[in-house]
Amino acid sequence: MSRGPGRIETKLLQLFARRPSAILTTAEICRHIYGVRHVDKKHRVAVLRALKRLASRSMPTLWRMVQRHERSDDPVV
């Protein structure tokens, strides 16, 4: 049973409220949320999971552009 948005989802909502038309990469979002210089896979996975929950719940206009056969930063619109 869900208890509402978690810490990462809350920070994502604040980030997109401040910059509604920004196009950010996954690494930029991770740096903003975690405050780290080097982004690890665990950071990307947690942020992408939270973005997926936000897109299904409260932000249906959230889009993620994924390049085929690439493992780079995905832009989030």
Image (spheres, rainbow, N blue to C red):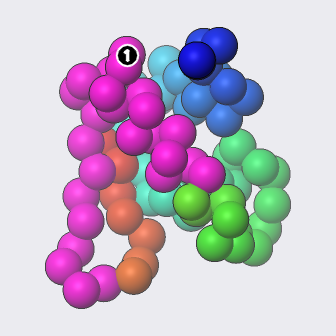
Q: Is residue 64 left or right of residue 13?
A: left
In the depicted structure, whether residue 21 falls above or below residue 69:
above
What x and y, as percent, mark residue 35?
80, 51
State whether residue 38 appears in this view: yes
Name the residue: 68% across, 65% down. Answer: 42
Q: Position of residue 26 (x, y in %)?
A: 49, 58
* Disc 1: CA contacts within 10 A as few (<14), some (14-19) or many (>=20): few
Residue 62 included in the magenta stretch of the image: yes
* Residue that lies at the very extreme toward the front in this rendered image: 1
Image point 58% across, 17% down: which residue? 1
Looking at the picture, how far across and down is residue 30, in whole percent?
A: 64, 54
Q: Amino acid at mark 1?
A: Ser
- In the image shown, does 19 or 58 lie closer to the viewer? 58
Q: Is residue 50 above or below residue 5?
A: below
Identify the residue position indicated by label 1 in the image.
Answer: 58
Query: Is residue 18 among what the camera can see?
Result: no
Q: Which residues are magenta?
A: 46-70
Compared with 19, 24 (above or below) is below
Q: Residue at x 39, y 40 (%)?
A: 52
* Residue sitting nearer the eye, 20 or 60: 60
Residue 61 forms part of the magenta stretch? yes
